[in-house]
Amino acid sequence: MAGGRRQSRRRAAGPVLLPALLLGLCCRAAPERIRYAIPEELGRGSLVGPLARDLGLSPAELPARKLRVATAAERQLKYFSVSAESGELYVSERLDREEMCGEAASCSVSFEALVQNPLNVFHVEVDIQDVNDNSPRFLRDTFQLEINELTSPGARFSLGVAEDPDVGSNALQGYELEKNGYFAVEVKQSQDGSKFAELVLRRALDRESEQSLRLVLTALDGGDPPRSGTAQLCINVTDANDNAPVFAQDRYRASLREDAPPGSTVLHVSASDADAGSNARITYGFGETPAKVLQKFVVDAESGTVTLQEALDFEDTRGYTLLVEARDGGGLVAHCEVEVEVLDVNDNAPEITLLSVSSPVPEDAPVGTVVALVNVMDRDSGENGQVSCELSGEAPLSLVASSSGGSYKVVTASALDREQAGEHRVTVVARDRGSPALSGRAALVLEVSDVNDNAPVFEEAAYSAYVAENNAAGAPVLRVRARDADAGANGRVSYWLAGGSAGAAPYVSVEARSGAVYAQRSFDYEQCREFAVAVRAQDGGAPARSSTATVRVFVLDRNDNAPRVLWPAAGAGPGAVAAGPAPFEVVPRSAEAGYLVAKVVAVDADAGRNAWLSYELVQAPEPALFRVGPHSGEVRTARAVSERDAAKQRLVAVVKDHGQPALSATATLHVVLAESLQEALPELSERAAGADSAAELQFYLVLALALLSALFLLSVALAVLARLRRAGPPAVLRCLGAQRFSAAGAAFPADFCEGTLPYSYNLCAAPGRAVAEGAWLPPPLPSLPAEELLGGERCGKRSPSSSAGAGEPPAEPDAPQVCEPARSRSSPSAGRSRRASGPGSSAAAVRGERSSGCPGGKERAGDAPCSASRQAAAALRALPAAAGSASPGGVSRRPSFE
């Protein structure tokens, strides 16, 4: 059944859609007001109309004008959207007229179309036309009626109203009753236009012949094709109840304010019954009434008082129609209508919606620029819904009413200045005309964007800085600062040098961001005492603005120059080597006190106190004989010269400045006490000879020290060479000599002519064969027996004790041997003898020629005599015993040596 409804809905919407679309395309409203008409139930993405073309916008203008829709009621805005490419208005959500407008005869959606550059607003209204998409529906599927058999023909019984959300011709049109012999249905229309069914008795009932009836009641609408709904009538025939209840009025009317509290009494209804007993007992209740009405009102069953049980809202429903029934004890029912009118109360404050805000606004915007669009709406009606709007707050803004109702434009009323006010805060106030009046407020914050209309301004037009000389390169001099009233890049100030006095540019530099001026090099007061530079400050605007300030730098003197002695000439002081003859002065012995001997002349390159010089005599053989003027530098005799005074006088004067710290220089003056120059010449010759002898003495001392060091190094080198010559070649080199042992196994050498054999010997092993730890190595071939060695015979026979073990291969005499010195631990005395012999004796291995034995063999230089072998016989025979018994395999264990 639901599928059939959807198919019929599509068939019904098809013929209506095309005329509606043509009507929307052809409908061009007056400027700032556009109207379209479309049927309900259009799918998402359906075209409503060419909104951009109706507004006079071409496709090329759409990106710049930024067409969009806005409304104060967000729930209405969700139904439509505008294409950014074509500017056409589309359906963005399914439209259900019944859900949107309910039972209203007309249904429309209103919103505003906004365009930018320049900012403007247009009122758009879309009428939603009804389609027959709802079937009539009874509130109950089954009606239970009890009718007395004595009921006269013509009696009427109300069956209530079938609901159909559609309007117009698609709404409920009539009722039909299943064919029967007793009843018929008639359609009645109330004053509000609703149609309800009444069951009319055509022929008298007879309970004895038919106790109950079941009939089908059908409700039909006027759609094409029509839709219908059905309900079952269950009629029970009862015994006689002659009189039905009768209401005092067929229609009751009452008015109720929407702010009436729940529990308020609406009105009283009353009915009477001419019967007696239980047939005259009347109870009240609601007949076929919509559920939302039953939620609002309740009727007392005994008294018939209708009471409000939920709060009313005039903006939601302006009136209610109640069907009240009175039922007697015999089952007879009477009906009456109660119409409740809801009176509006000013309970809704105006609602303010900021549709668009152009923030920030440049401060050079012309007067009359639109900065915001405001929409004001009051849900109340009449004077309660009439609204006036104004701006509250000190700001160069004004409010202009738009041609479309409820819309206002906020425009600039005077020039803006960001430096005086970076933002403007105003309050939009809307008041209705109700009593008492209600108002709504909305805050509007408008930021003002900066324009580069201010140049940087220095805190001072001219700066002065004082820097002491000898400063470090890169030292800060001062900081200049310029302020720009603009913001952002327009207020970001950078600095650089724009010029200055001649030669001043290399002295300083300025940091671009901070304005700090730094010294590029060390200043010298004696070369430059002051200079000036020009610093320019420029902002980052376009075009940029700038200003200039002068920076004058004064160099302060420091005591960095010591006094310089002009006379006596430099180099005559102590510790200096004179390039020529030292100056001297001749003072006659007849000179009296105050005699002018000489004048120390000195200068100081500094200035001020740093250049004030004072003189002081610090060294003199006769301190009381001479004095120096503290300010003039004149050297005079303090007393008369006597015969006791030395003929040669050496005076040292110090010249000091008054700086902090003070610097000084010394001047040395040689004075000869003589009556004439000829008398002074011998004294001068002795002084020169004495200076030459001191220099020669120093030269001879250095030469003697060098010769002693060379002789010591030569002695140490000769001693080391002599020691190495006596020690002979190393043992490793001797082991690699002419005698070669077998590669099959290591053995003792054939001749034991070394006298220290029990204590130190060379153990030679063939490379390429490992020697087991703790095992004796077989002797080489040929080897001598111990008896022959002890008996002094030639070393040409083999001894049974020194023969190779069982299974040992014969030694190869040509195998290379590697020698390792080993020492025996035979006895403590042997150890002491070994330590006494020293490394030379323990490392000297005896390598005998095979052609001759020890007694007749040729002895090498440095070897011990062959007779020493007899003295070591006991130790040689004790070697196997010290090593321990042989292993079961016949291999002897090697003794441990240190």
Image (cartoon, rainbow, N blue to C red):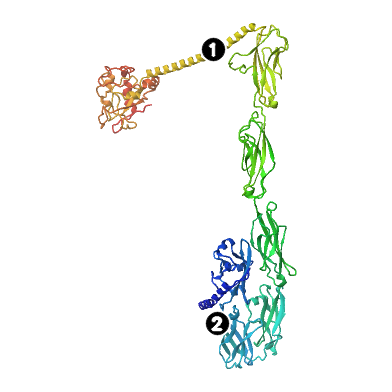
Q: Which residue is mark 1?
A: 696
Residue 236 sits above or below residue 735 on the image = below
Residue 368 is at least partly visible in this image: yes
Does the residue at mark 2 contact the one at mark 1 (Cβ under 8 Å)? no
Where residue 796 appears, x then y in whole percent?
24, 22
Q: Is residue 127 left or right of residue 754?
A: right
Nearer-the-camera pick, 432 or 347: 432
Q: Residue furthest front?
A: 502
- Name the amino acid type tagged 2: Pro
Place residue 844 in its image quadrant: top left
Where residue 161 appears, x then y in whole percent?
62, 82
Where residue 509 appears, x then y in whole percent?
61, 38
Place residue 758 in its image quadrant: top left
Judged from the image, the secondary structure of the residue bearing numbered disc 2 is loop
Judged from the image, the secondary structure of the residue bearing numbered disc 1 is helix
The quadrant of the image that shows the C terminus is top left
Residue 863 sits above or below residue 151 on the image = above
Residue 461 sits above or below residue 253 on the image = above
Residue 333 sits above or below residue 798 on the image = below
- Name the amino acid type tagged 1: Glu
Q: Which of the numbered marks, if any, corresponds to residue 781?
A: none
Q: Is residue 168 left or right of residue 722?
A: right
Q: Which of the numbered marks, if any, corresponds to residue 226?
A: 2
